[in-house]
Amino acid sequence: MSKFVLENINKVYDGKYTAVSDFNLHIEDQEFIVLVGPSGCGKSTTLRMIAGLEEITSGEFRIEGKVVNDVASKDRDIAMVFQNYALYPHMSVYENMAFGLKLRKFPKKEIDDRVQNAAEILGLPNYLEKKPKALSGGQRQRVALGRAIVRDAKLFLMDEPLSNLDAKLRVQMRAEIAKLHQRLKTTTVYVTHDQTEAMTMATRLVVMKDGFIQQIGSPKEVYGYPDNVFVGGFIGSPAMNFFEGKLVDGYIHIGQVSMKVPQDKLTLLGDKGYNGKDLILGLRPEHIYGDVDTLAHFPDTTIEVKVEVSELTGAELMLYSSLEGQPFVARIHADATAEPGKVMPLSFDLTKAHFFDKETENRIR
Amino acid sequence: MTNNLMTFFPSLQVLSEYPTELNEDDYTFHNPQSHTWISIRKTEVTNREYGLLSSIYTEIKSRTAVNDLTSTKWLNFLKSAGPSPLNEAESVRIIQLYFKENNINEADITEACRAFFGDSMQLLFISSQSAYLIEKQTTYLCTVEDFSSFIAALESDFYSKARLYIGKFQPVNSHFPQHFSTEKDWFLNSIERHRAERIYTMENSFPFHLIQEMSEDMKHVLVKEILIPIDYDLELLQTVQLFFENGFNASITAKKLHIHRNTLQYRLAKFHNITGIPVRQFDGALVAYCASLIAEKH
């Protein structure tokens, strides 16, 4: 039996504005679930329904088999971490971490043990007497985590906890939270709009859009087999390239350009009745190659393109171009010379291609 | 059930949220099944009916909040036109706090407020679910981010959804109670109509009040000129709304919508083509924004 079960959850405000629709998720013990999607997709609302801060309009939320829809937030054995630290400026780090326990009338000795233990885990023993103002952004976020850890809750809920940090610190804290989860093994539901954060931290991702779940899966599954165009475009940076084309006699025709579709994919598309029909081809930037040795392996899918922009990111070069008016980006080796304006051959590795229905934008499977 | 009760008690009102202030002339009950609250004039209820209602519903009783002398002076000033508790030249603003749960512990909340704001705020309890924070106009003024952090701290420690309205600074003279009374109305209205929000201000509430006060004729113009031509296309409306709310910044708007800048430009152009209204110009954007709010209400 799953530890936390969300079944057919809906959230409707004022009887008309639907924030979350038919949300279904089974969360196993010790999982690190990341809810990811653009702003307004319903991820924070879902988290707040789990927390008990928002009422569930319909559906069931169960913890260890017991329906908790009407159980007060304080009785759900959860701890929350927010984006804006939520620290009391006039309390010391120690007092900040102890406050929640004090409100719950924990004995002083137990409060002290828990705070000291959390401080040890988070590397904060030397800061316990300091006020939040004297701490860096990363240290403040650690105190915020400490406030959750001391509660020894069944479930951690984190709502964009790293959004206030600069890029470098965010990467560092990302690793720290992952390490913390490995150590404490507390089941965690984490909300972010940042797909990189989601990919690197999650045991399972829940991709959301407009209140609906788009896909649930491990980061590898979601990246490798996106269920629809939205997921393919949202997960991955740079985003997946999409080309509208028509499948005719084993070739995908994108405007005047034709590329041969590998046999296994062709069989599937044929079986599903797509021969002669419009569809969407999805290809990740790393599956478009520019080095001479590789080009020879893809004689049927090598196309001459004009470089519009090239960005050197270090080991790689992001090459921006377009195919029959449809923009795309290729992630190629930094050794390649690709000045803007240059015409060069690129190989499109269609063995790695994804095909989507043009109308529904769902993956063809 | 509620409809039937209305035939017996014409004054009955159904509330979808816990009432922020309990009227002493009314009985207020909570219906746990529909999770609504009903209030009925006491004069309409006999003893027998009161007993019956109490056995079906949970009565919400007004609790006398314990306030210190300074707070009492403030309440007297705000509610009963008493003398100003401060020099009339001083300016304050009132932050109205509202908790979803009705079991807040005043001593604990007081400690939390002091730990958050130090001695710069005076806290007044109004009911078991609402309080006012009075902030003097000094060199440091709390920002929306401060209040957002405060709400998050309260939610994580007290496990209760909290909402607040940040008032405007005003000298504490005889006009202040009226000014505050208007802000109270705005807060109540905002809570009723914009439940997903947690922090309300005059600025973020104003557009909704504007639409509420707008005449039906004016609304009809926007429906006819914009909403019908675009067939109430929610995607287009959300795009123009966010474009306006983000100060016409295409990059931020595109990022928030998680669309490419070109897609945003395409949608704005499409809106312009269909309606003839240039949303990149202020007057066009304002009209389009109002139309999007009317569509939201529908």
Image (spheres, rainbow, N blue to C red):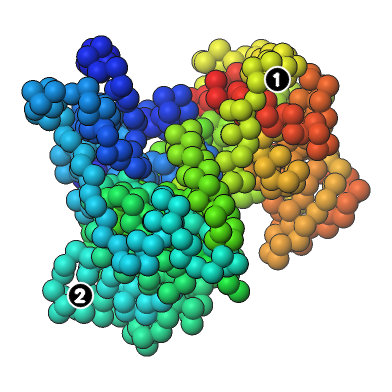
Left or right for B59, reference B211? left
Left or right for A355, reference A311? left
Left or right for A157, reference B264? left
> Residue at label 1?
B218
Outermost right residue:
A341
Q: Looking at the picture, does residue A181 appear above or below residue B56?
A: below
Left or right for A150, reference A224? left
Outermost bottom residue:
A126
Question: Does dot 2 land on a helix, a strand or a loop?
Answer: helix
**Which amino acid, by three-letter code, is at mark 1?**
Met
Closer-to-camera residue (A128/A317): A128
Residue ID at (35%, 83%)? A128
Dot 1 crowding, Cα within 10 Å, few <14, some 14–19, many 20+: few
On the image, the x and y values in percent for residue A243 come to 70, 30
Question: Does dot 1 land on a helix, a strand or a loop?
Answer: helix
- The quarter of the image holding the N terminus of chain A is top left
Residue ID at (43%, 56%)? B82
Q: Looking at the picture, does residue A123 appear above or below residue A7?
A: below
On the image, the x and y values in percent for residue A32 come to 35, 53
> Residue at label 2?
A111
